[in-house]
Amino acid sequence: MSSRFIRQRRLFSALAAASAMVAITVPNVPAADSECSARGADIVRQAYPEAEQVSEREFKVGGQTITLTKDPDDNPHQLICKTWPARPEFTLVAVPLMTSQTADGNEGDIELLVVDSDSLKLKHRLRLPDLLTDDAVFVSGVAFDTAYYRISESEIAFGVRIERRGSSRPNPFGETTLWLFTIDNKELRPVLDNIVVAAHQGEWDTNCAGEFQTIERRLAMGRPQPNRYSDILVSERKIKTISTLGQDGECVDDKDAITTSRRLRFEGGAYQVPENIKGID
């Protein structure tokens, strides 16, 4: 078996393992679920009464396109829905509002909806401009994160995770970022912005020699306190790998791992995320 094939297999196995490890702490959900498949059109009609259905799976509204779920499908530019386990009377919906989609890049927003799980009546909405706009680093996945984020004695947040991937083989790149949202005073609002919870990047000769880095971050909520928001405890594991071609023609990996932790505090209406752990804009 060629060293080139072995190196490729090791690289992608490592990236898959890193993503899986983070998902244990902050679970991903499939983009296309049966609930969205069955009720997606009804949700769109209630939330966008002016929308025009132009095909079986597409609506047009204000010059933008909404694509309904096709199950199974890995298209990140389609409707996703998730009943909120912490508040099952609500269903969370992420609506892709795409302005353009080409091979060179995409332009689009996400609008978050909170709807009544039974009637689908719209309760809250929040527009997130340009969250689906990309080019060489493309959006490869969107998912709700409904881990139990109790940010205060009276508030529970839910998350949205965005996965992005680069298209360069010699310089592989990928990251998963997390946003948190809560309903406060009958308003849907963001409380944590664009923290990277998983990342990988590297530079190699596409055969063996190269340098790679993976980052895994796990979030844990501090204990709720009266009249204040919980801190978020972030543990980070950073693994640096240097690969060289050995005398026997096999790749040799030299790995170094560093574990750190930090605390995010709620100030000025949101958790303060340092710029060096935020995702790309």
Image (cartoon, rainbow, N blue to C red):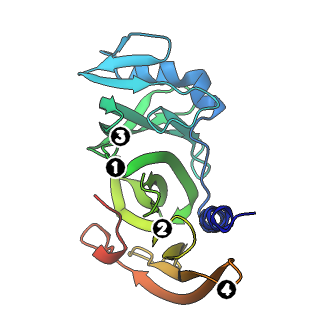
CB under 8 Å between discs 1 and 3: no
- Residue 136 marker: 1
Please name which of the two marks, 2 or 3, marks the residue nearer to the observer. 2
Q: Tag on residue 110?
A: 3
Question: Which of pointers 1 and 3 lies earlier in the amino acid sequence?
Answer: 3
**First along the sequence among labels 4 and 2:** 2
Quarter of the C terminus within the rendering: bottom left
Which is more toward the observer, 228 or 115? 115
| Secondary element at image label 3 | strand
> Where does the image place residue 245, in percent across and percent down from the top left?
60, 80
Name the residue: 27% across, 44% down: 130
Mark 3 residue crowding within 10 angstroms, few (<14) / some (14–19) / many (20+):
many
Q: Give coordinates of residue 232: x percent, y percent.
A: 46, 76
The 10 Å Cα crowd at callout 2, few under 14, some 14 to 19, many 20 or more, is many
Question: What secondary structure is marked by label 4?
Answer: loop
The answer to whether mark 4 and mark 1 are in CB contact below 8 A is: no
Q: CA distance from mark 1 to mark 3?
A: 20 Å
Q: Position of residue 168 (x, y in %)?
A: 42, 56
- Mark 4 or mark 3: name the one nearer the start of the chain: 3
Look at the picture and state if 172 lies above or below 46: below
Question: Dot 1: few (<14), some (14–19), or many (≥20) neighbours within 10 Å?
Answer: some
Q: Earlier in the sequence, mark 4 or mark 1?
A: 1
Looking at the image, is mark 4 or mark 1 nearer the viewer? 4
Q: Which of the two discs, 4 and 3, sits closer to the camera?
A: 4
Q: How far apart are labels 2 and 3 at the CA level?
A: 22 Å
Q: Nearer the viewer, residue 132 or 222?
A: 132
Residue matched to label 2: 199
First in residue order: circle 2 vs circle 1: 1
